[in-house]
Amino acid sequence: MQRLVLFAKDPRAGRVKTRLARDTDAAWAARLYEAFLEDLAAAVVRPASWEAVLAHGEAEAGHELSRLFGPRWTLRPQGAGDLGERLERAFCAARDEGMSRTVVIGSDAPTLTPDDIERAFQRLAVEPGVVFSPSPDGGYALIGLSRNVNPRGLFDGVRWSTCDALADTEGAALARGARVERLPPVPDIDTRDDLAPLRQRLEAERSLAPRTLEVLREETWR
């Protein structure tokens, strides 16, 4: 059994994409984030291949998350703690519930595709261990673990929101004797500088994240 977990927040202005909001507009940044969620919710579900879980950052899923993530998704709270504690909780729950492979993705990477996720699951099936889709800022947009990797303590000491997050997590996995593999990189969208390359790609690949492209075409944030 395989599980995909998407980490997300309720798309409220001033609560999401705060770095982007500083250089654009808080309401527009929240609309863009909501578009990310809408595109990911539609794109990455494959009921015959994996079960899909939306891990929401609040104790209860807000109206917008409940609207965007329909019956094909199971909604669960991430719980308290830093990102490492929340990741550990999600991986432990999947392992305890019999999953042989679990992939967690972030909601800041609207160009993630089902093929990216399928590739991660396939690599974990062939070579059990840990897989990453790196992001250019030194973090990662996707992390997958096979059942033989115990997630408890794996994320202790990771320097989140720095250029060392990927290296720290890889180092911890290697120290446990786990096989580690990097998949093709997938960009996170965090700042205004990320917007032009994202729009350029989406204009070239119109089916990739159509709602995100709609919002990027708005001129209100410029």
Image: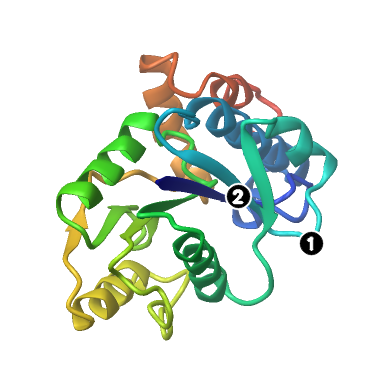
Question: Given the current orientation, which residue lies at the most extreme right position?
Answer: 63
Query: Residue at position x 54%, y 22% from top?
Result: 213
Query: Residue at position x 41%, y 79% from top?
Result: 158
The residue under label 2 is which amino acid type? Leu
- Crowding around mark 2 (Cα neighbors within 10 Å: few <14, some 14 to 19, many 20+) is many
Is 213 displayed left or right of 215 in the figure?
Answer: left
Q: Nearer the viewer, mark 1 or mark 2?
A: 1
Where's the C terminus, which quadrant? Answer: top right
Q: Nearer the viewer, residue 222 or 148?
A: 148
Residue named by callout 2: 20
Tell me: residue 46, above or below residue 164: above
Is 204 displayed left or right of 174 in the figure?
Answer: right
- For marks 1 and 2, give the CA distance: 25 Å
**Of helix, strand and loop, which one carries label 1?**
loop
Q: Nearer the viewer, residue 191 or 10?
A: 10
Residue 111: image quadrant is top left
- Crowding around mark 1 (Cα neighbors within 10 Å: few <14, some 14 to 19, many 20+) is few
Residue named by callout 1: 59
